[in-house]
Image (tube, helix red, strand yellow):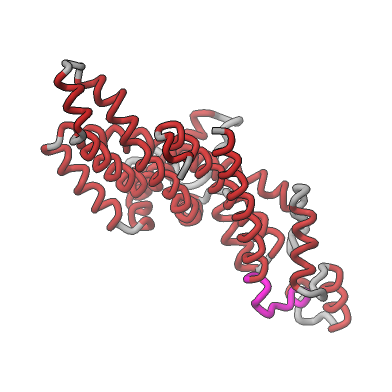
Amino acid sequence: MLSFIARRTAAGAVLLFVISLLSYLLLSIPDVDVGRQLLGQGASQDLVDARNAALGLDRPVLAQYLDWLAHAVRGDFGTSWFSGENVTRAIANRLPVTLSLMVGVTLVTAVLSFLLGVWAGVRRGAIDRFVQVFAVVGYALPGFLVTLVIVLVFAVHLRWFPAIGYVGLTESFTGWLSTVTLPVAALSIGSVAGVSQQVRGSVIDVMRQDYVRTLRARGLPPWRIVFRHVLRNASAPALAVLGMQFVSMLGGAVLVEQIFGLPGIGSMTVNYTTRGDIPVIMALVMFSVIGVIVINLIVDILIGWLNPKARIA
């Protein structure tokens, strides 16, 4: 298992390096005069050139990247070109908001998907048809439309939850819960639809295996067969899909945070990307990639524990 984790960690490190290099090169392609944007159109060209030189923008792109990488591996992502704010501190202030959404969506997706998928795969009938219809509808409905409907119904008309704003967990647990419930619900619908369908299909496939028939013939209780044998073998494909859903959640968080007025990483990404603030954008990309790598590493470890053959693959 340790060698399995080491291989996955090494692959994640290589992926992080490749994405950082490609991201920096792509961000450097647009011919944007950052010094002019900072100083305004009325500034002299000498002042603009001096400002660009102070930011290191007069050097080759590869040299700029290597300098950034040398600081990034020490946890120093520099300061924002436009606000002068420390990038690491700015992200740390916003990270709890996005983490609240990601953790909440992951838990809701995992619990509801496995409950619905197992129930549909074992019982079949009406619940099976419901899960299949729910999966199709969940994929078909645009995320922004689902989010707007949730806001209109539960925040505007029923007024059960606030429409915008965020309360930190350390300030008030009930306030935090009320401000993240609707965003988590909006992000969870599509994820639950996809993962529950995968769980259903895996459970049905495992239930048809010969060893399940043997366990039934031995008189084992149905709940024991399902939760001790079927679910263990059916979980690996569903966990893989759940890991891939995390990437979609990060993309959906941008939209959801904008609609609900949440000061998270998603809204920060939109604001600084429009400015072309490379230090902030690169830090956001790295934090996002690290999050994806960590989630997929956890999923790989769980799959390797459930299915030892996956450690060799």
Q: Position of residue 232 (x, y in %)?
A: 34, 30
Relative height, residue 44 to residue 129 (above, below): below
Left or right: where 69 falls relative to 313: right
Front residue of 84 and 304: 304
Find residue 60 and report its horizontal and vertical position in percent: 78, 75
Quadrant including the N terminus: top right
Magenta residues, start to end: 26-36
- Answer with left or right where residue 280 lies relative to residue 198: right
Q: Position of residue 124 (x, y in %)?
A: 14, 36
Residue drawn at point x = 60 percent, y = 48 percent: 290
User: Residue 275 appears at what percent x and percent y?
Assistant: 65, 68
Asked if residue 95 lies in the magenta stretch, the reply is no
Outermost residue to the bottom: 45
| Residue 50 in sight | yes
Q: Quadrant of the C terminus?
A: top left
Residue 31 within the magenta-colored segment of the rendering: yes
Q: Residue at x 45, y 50 (%)?
A: 249
Task: Identify the residue shown where x is 85% and y is 83%.
Answer: 44
Residue 284 visible in the displayed image: no
